[in-house]
């Protein structure tokens, strides 16, 4: 996951996110993602590779594209809300939008080494 500013950050622009602020917010976003777990898999959604894209505007609005391990996942209707709640808990974030996407489809190669180790998939 790479957080990117979705708006240009001109020198001296009011409210523009500096790279240092974006880096700090990125760390907080990752921490938030790591609090959300797929109930069927004992690994957080970040380590599973379910977070595809994160955009952060200069106004500190966050847009997240995420997926599920399978389109028929029983929590498909709930998990985006869990992610939204986790991100919304970050004080610097103004608005949050989470979109569920299935292109490209998720596969185990998207998991971190930590997740593979936890699931004995090496």
Image (tube, rainbow, N blue to C red):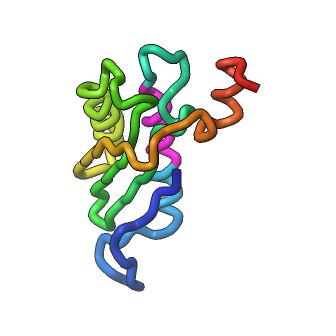
Which residue is drawn at the image coordinates 35% and 23% (left, top)? 73
Residue 31 percent across, percent down from the top left: 49, 37
Residue furthest out toward the right: 122
Q: Is residue 77 above or below residue 58?
A: above
Is residue 91 positioned above or below 62 on the image? above
In the rendered image, the vertical position of residue 77 relative to residue 5, given as above or below: above
Q: Nearer the viewer, residue 58 or 104?
A: 104
Examine the rendered structure and indicate whether residue 12 appears above or below residue 35. Answer: below
Indicate left or right for 13 with 94 as reference.
right
Quarter of the figure that contains the C terminus = top right
Image x and y of residue 65, in percent: 36, 48
Which residue corresponds to the image point at 46% horizontal and 14% vertical from the top-left? Answer: 40
Secondary structure predominantly adopted by residues drawn in magenta: helix
Query: Residue 101 location in percent, x, y?
Result: 34, 45
Verify whether residue 74 appears in magenta.
no
Of residues 76 and 96, the one nearer the viewer is 76
Residue range highlighted in magenta: 27-36
Looking at the image, residue 57 sits to the left or right of residue 40; the answer is left
Camera-nearest residue between 24 and 39:
39
Which residue is found at the position 31% from the left and 41% from the top?
Answer: 100
């Amino acid at each position: 996951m790479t957080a990117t500013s979705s708006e240009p950050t001109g020198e001296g622009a009011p409210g523009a996110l500096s790279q240092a602020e974006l880096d700090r917010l990125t760390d907080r976003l990752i921490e938030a993602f790591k609090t959300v777990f797929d109930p069927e898999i004992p690994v957080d959604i970040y380590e599973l590779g379910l977070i595809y894209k994160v955009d952060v505007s200069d106004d500190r609005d966050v847009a997240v594209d995420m997926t599920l391990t399978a389109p028929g996942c029983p929590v498909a209707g709930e998990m985006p809300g869990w992610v939204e709640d986790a991100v919304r808990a970050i004080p610097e974030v103004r608005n949050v939008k989470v979109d569920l996407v299935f292109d490209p489809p998720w596969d185990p190669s998207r998991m971190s080494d930590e997740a593979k180790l936890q699931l004995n998939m090496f």
